[in-house]
Image (spheres, rainbow, N blue to C red):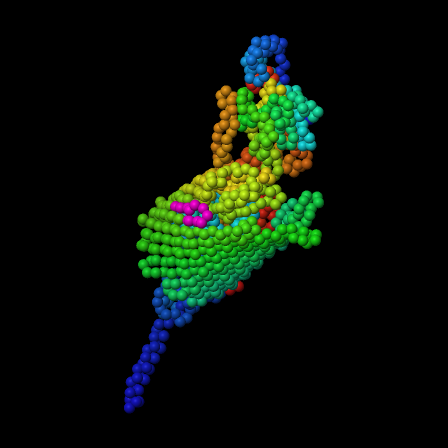
Amino acid sequence: MTPLRNTLQLLSLPAVLLLFLSTACNDSSTGPGNEEEDESQIESYIVEDIPASDAITYYSLRDNSIVEASDSASTEWDIAFSTTTIYTNSEASGPGDGGALVLDVSFDDVTIAPSDGYSTDTDTLLAIPTGSGNGWYNYNRTTHIVTPIENKTLVIKTGDGANYAKLQVLSYYKGNPDLSGEEFSNNPDNYPSGYYTFEYVIQLNGSREFAE
Amino acid sequence: MQSVHLYPLMAFCFIGMLLNVSAVYAQHTTLSGTVINEKNQPLSNVYVLLNGDLYYAVTDTNGRFSIQQVKPGEYTLRIQRIGFETLEKVITVDSEMDGKLILTLKPQRYRSKETVVVTATRTRRDIEDVPVPVTVIDEKEISSTGSMRLSDILAEQTGLMLTADHGMGVQLQGFDPEYTLIMLDGQPLIGRTAGTLNLERITVDNVQQIEMIKGPSSALWGSDALAGVINIITKQGDRPFELNVNSRYGRNQTLDFGANLSMQRNDWKQNLFLNRNSSQGYSLIPNSIAQTVPSYQNYTATYRTEIPVSDAIDLELHGRYYNEKQSGTDYLGSTDNPTLLDGEDLQEDYSLSPSVHFSLTGGLRGKISHYFSGFRTDTRYTYRQGDSLYEHTTFKQYYNKSELQLNQTWNASHTSTWGGGYVHEQLNAQRYPHNPAFNSYFLLAQHEWMPGTRWDLIAGLRFDAHSEYTSQLSPKLSVRYKLSDRLHLRASGGSGFKAPDFRQLFLDFTNPTAGYSVFGSSNVRERIRELQEQNKIQQVLIPLNQLEEIRSERSLAFNAGVDLRPSEGLELRVNLFRNNVDDLIESAPVARKNNGQPIYSYFNLQNVYTQGLETQLRWQPVEQLLISAGYQLLDARRKIEETRTVQDDQGEVVERTFSSYEPMLNRSQHMANIKLYYTWEEPDISANLRGTWQGKYARFDANGNGFADPGEYDDGYMIWNTAVDKTFSGRYTLRLGVDNLFDFTRPFDLSWLPGRIFYAQLSLQLY
C-alpha cells in the first residue's frame, strides 16, 4: 500500500518566478483555465491497493496520499473510494469545487483536459456514474468479476477546483492480478476485491495540459 | 337327353382343366441362383426379393437360393445383406434360367455410393444431384462410432460445436443452437428450453441417416431454419421380418438398450422401436454437492407404419413417446453450510403424425399430413430435511400442424412443389399465466429446372404469417453446375428466419427475490399500464406508444462450393459461406418500478455476421482404408455500437457514435477432425480412430463488454475416440471402444465431456 512515485519534476526557481509573475499580471485568470505561460508541473503516479471495501477512503491526488476521514469535510481530498463507487469532492459528496468527466479515450491519448463538461456529485447522479458499463468498470453477472473498462479515462477536477488530473483504474483486486489467468481463478481468496490500483497524471500549475 | 347335353360340357371342362394344368407347368418356374461376393465366395443370409416382398428367399451357406412358382415375366430383383450394398436388377424370368443366375454383391463402404436425401428439396433425391450442399451421416458411421444419442455423433462432424446450456445443443456455422431446426422424419421436434432443443433426447439407435443442410432453409422449412436444418431419418426395415437388438454398457453405469422390429407383408410395412438409456451421471469436480451430470433414465418408443390402400394411395403413421427422469442434489446457501435439496426432473415428449400420400394422373403427387406433438417438464425440489416442497414448476407445450404438399413433375426437366399449412401452438406454464397460444400459416412454392444434364436450378419462396408478429417472406435460389464428372460447382443464396418464441412474446416473470420483471413483447404494454394504474411505476424509459412490434430474426446468406473428385477414391468438398443476420432479439429495460428494479422486454437489437470456409476430404487409398478429414474456418462477429465521449482537436468534449464488428464469445475460429477407418474383410473386423479438434474459444466474457477480447480465450483441445468391432456370421457384432482416449476434461467449461469412457456394445441381427 505504499504509493509509488514514478516521476516527479521539481520546479526550477525561474519557473516559480515566472509562475508568480504570470498570476500577478493576469488577475482574471483564476483557477482552471489558466494555461498560458505557466511552467508545466506534471506529476504522474501509480498507486497500489487503496482499500475501499470496509470504509470510504479519501484521497488527495495533489499530495498523492490518503486523507484521514476526519478531514472529509475539507477540500483536502479530491476523490474518495467506496467499493466500486468513486466520489468527487463536489456538491452532494463534499464541500469542494471538484468534479469529473469520463472520457472514452485511452489514458495516453488524453493530453489535455477539456475546459468544460465536468459533472458534480448530486443526490441522484455521481460525476463518475455507478453501475456496470456506466462508469469505469464492467461487472460480469456470471463470474461476479469487476473489470476496469479499457480506454476509459477519468478527468478529475481537484477538491480545491484549481487543478486537473487524469486517472485510470487498473484493478479492483488486491495485488492487481491477471483476471483471466488461472492463478486468479484458482485462488480467488488471495486476491480480495475492493482494492484499487490506479494510475494518474496531475497538472499542478492549474493548466489543462497533461503533456509537455 | 340331359346326358347328351352334358357330355360336350364335361368334355369342354376337362379340356379346359387340361389346358389349365399345362398352363401351370408352362407358366410357373423356379428362380434359383447363387449370390457371391467380389472374390467369388458364396454369401449366406442374403435376402433375395422379387417385386417388393411378393416372393423372397434367403441364401444358404453355399450362397444358393431358390424361389418357386414364379410366373415368367419381367421382375425387379432386390438382393440385400447387412454389410453389403443393396443390388437391384431387372430380370426376365423364363424356364431356361433356373440355377443360372449369379449375383455379385459389393461390400458396403462407410458411405454408399448413392445416397437419397429429402431435406434439400422436400422430395427424395440423389445427394449428388441437389444444388444445395447436404451432409449425410449414415447408419454405418453412427454404428461404427458406438454413438447412442444425437449429440454423440454430431460432436464429430465438421463445423459443429457442442454447447451445454439448458441441454446439449449444437452450433452450426457459428450460430447458437436455437437457430437450427431439428426434425424427426421431416417433422419439427418441439420442447426447447432457453432456445436449446436437448439433443440427448434423441436416440440414434434406429436412425437410417442424418441429413444436414448448413445455411438458411426457411424457404422450405420455415421458422428456426435460420442457420440450417438437421433432419433425422429413422429406419424402415426392408426385409419381410427383421429384429435387431443393440446394447451398450460403459463407464458411469451408462446402459443403452434398443430393440428394432420391422415387418412387411404385401407392401404393408410396420416398424416398432424401443430404447432405454440410463446413467448414474458423473462429477467432474471432486467433493461438490451437485453432480456435474445427474443420474437419469429415459425411454423412447416409436412406431411407424405404411399401408398401401390402392395403387395411388398410401397411408402413413408415425408415433413417438419419450420420457426421461433425472434425479440430483442441489443446495441453497453456501457450500460450507448448505441446505440440501433433492431434485426430480421429468421431461416428456410425444407426437403422432398421420399422413396420406397420393398420386394423381399427369405426374402429380401429393401428401396431406397432420402433426401433433406435446412436450412437458415437471421439476420438483424438496428439502432433504423435513421433505417439504421448495419449488415445483411445470411447463407444457402443444403443437399442431396440418399441411398439404403437392409435387408436379411436368417433364424430365421441370418439377414444381407447392405446399401450405396451418400451425397452432399453445403453452401451459406458471411463467405464462394466460396460457398463451399462437397461430400461423404458411404457403410455399418451389420450382426446379434442369436445362440439360449439367445444370440444375431451384427457386423457392415461402410466406409465413403469424398472429403475434410481422409476416415473413423467405426466398432461396440454388444452382448446380457439373463442369465434368470430376468437378461440380454449387451456389445458393437465400434467407432464413426465426420467429420470436413464446418467451420473447409472452413471458410474465417477476423475480421473487431481486424484484425485477421480464415481460414478453406481446404483453409488455398491457402489464406496464396495469402497474401504472396501481402506481407501481416510477419511470417509463421508452414511451409505450413507441414500442414497436417485435420482428422475426432474419438472415441473408450465400453459400458457394466445389466438389472435386480427382481420382477414384478421392473426394474433396469445399464450401464458402457468409450469413448476415439482422434483428437478433435481446432484452433491454423499458421501465423502472417503485422498488428501483427494472422491467425488461424483448427488442430487435443485434446485428451479426458469420462467414467462413468448410472443407471435407475423403480418401480411400486402398480398399480397406478410409481417411476422412474436415476443417472449418469461422469468423463470427456481432456489431457493437456505442456512443463515446471523446475530445476534439482543442481537447473539448464531444459525443461520437462508433460501431464495429467484434468476435463473438464461445466460437472457435478453427475446428478440424480426422477419422481413420480400417476393415479386414476376411475376419470381418473393423477399427477406427477419430480425432476432433476445437480451436481456442472465448468462454467467459471476463470484462463484460459483450465480445471476445484477446485475453479471454481458452486453449483449444482435441478429443480422440476409438472403436474396434468384429462381426460374426455377418449378423452379430461385438464392439469395444474408448471415447475420450486421453481423458481430457474441463469441468467448469465443458460439463458435457466426461473423462475417458470404456464401453462394450453388442448388436444382434436376430432375424
Query: Is residue A189 placed above or below B130 in the rendered structure?
Result: above
The residue closer to the viewer here, B380 or B69, is B380
The spot of residue B47 in percent (x, y) is 45, 64
The spot of residue A136 in percent (x, y) is 58, 30
Give yes or no for residue B140 being in the magenta stretch: no
The residue closer to the viewer here, B576 or B55, is B576
Find the magenta span and give its range.
B464-475
The spot of residue B328 in percent (x, y) is 64, 51
Q: Is residue B104 visible?
A: no
Q: Residue at x 67, y 32 (%)?
A: A53
The residue closer to the viewer here, B510 or A133, is B510
Q: Residue at x 62, y 29 (%)?
A: A86
Q: Residue at x 49, y 34 (%)?
A: B641
Q: Quadrant of the N terminus of chain B?
A: bottom left
Q: Is residue B158 left or right of residue A74?
A: left
Give yes or no for residue B466 being in the magenta stretch: yes
Q: Is residue A113 visible?
A: yes
The residue closer to the viewer here, B627 or A48, is A48
Q: Quick one: which residue is furthest to the bottom in this view?
A: B1
Q: Is residue B55 left or right of residue B245?
A: left
Q: Is residue B338 left or right of residue B11?
A: right
Q: Residue at x 36, y 75 (%)?
A: B24
Query: Is residue A212 placed above or below B695 in the rendered structure?
Result: above
